[in-house]
Image (cartoon, rainbow, N blue to C red):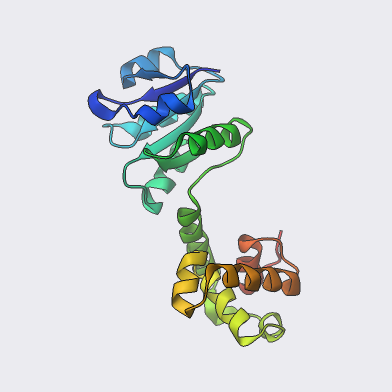
Amino acid sequence: MTELFVCQGPDEIPRWRAAFDEARLVTPQQARAQAGSGDGVWVMSNLAGWQGLVSLLAARGATVKVLSYTPNSREALRAMNAGARGYGHALSAPELLRQMALVTRHQGIWVPPELLAQVMGGAYRALGGESQHQAEALSGLTDRERAVALAVAEGQSNKEVARRLEITERTVKAHLGAIFRKLGVRDRLQLILRLSQREAV
């Protein structure tokens, strides 16, 4: 499978070639002419008209990922709406780029963990947020576990929760393990659904 990096001029990043030996750098015009079904295409978000290009290539069956120098949740949403299956930092390490390619090639979606936490926090608020917590769900948690659960549901990363509660990230992970076990959920998304009085799926 061909890996095409769509950029202009000085945007070539050495780690792209380190990630994929056969990677080719192409202009948007070359991508329109060359990319097709089964190709992995990486589009820089600083290109004019990048969303239209993503939509076009995704419609052809290419697996499109969008790379940004300044990743943010709003741009990630625009990328996914345009048909991208992945969104990440343009300066990601080669191993991370390879992981992104593998996940998206197998029909998965890839976004950086910190952006996923923001999206999940938005989903939590959209589903009713703190005002709708089930008393019985929280009653089985200790005070510290409750604080961790609510912070995670708001979209905070483990690092942010640790800083907020003045504990270590390792302690946050331990609390999350206990929370998941007590509430019968597998991950953060199910935790959000549980605290928002929605049945976890």
The relative height of residue 138 versus residue 71 in the rendered view (above or below) is below
Residue 13, by quadrant, is: top left
Quadrant position of the C terminus in the picture: bottom right
Give the residue displayed 40% in from the left and 53% down from the top: 73
Residue 141, by quadrant, is: bottom right
Q: Can residue 97 be seen in this view?
A: yes
Give the residue displayed 48% in from the left and 66% down from the top: 159
Image position, residue 190 (x, y; %): 66, 63
Image position, residue 11 (x, y; %): 28, 29
The relative height of residue 181 versus residue 92 in the rendered view (above or below) is below
State the residue in front, 25 or 19: 19
Say whether residue 143 is left or right of residue 164: right
Q: Give the farthest residue toward the top.
A: 33
Say whether residue 139 is left or right of residue 4: right
State the residue in front, 90 or 185: 90
Image position, residue 33 (x, y; %): 39, 12
Image position, residue 7 (x, y; %): 31, 26
Residue 137, by quadrant, is: bottom right
Q: Give the farthest residue toward the left.
A: 9
Say whether residue 28 is left or right of residue 102: left
Q: Can residue 56 be seen in this view?
A: no
Quadrant position of the N terminus in the picture: top right
State the residue in front, 175 or 88: 175
Give the residue displayed 36% in from the left and 19% down from the top: 25
Counting labels gives 0
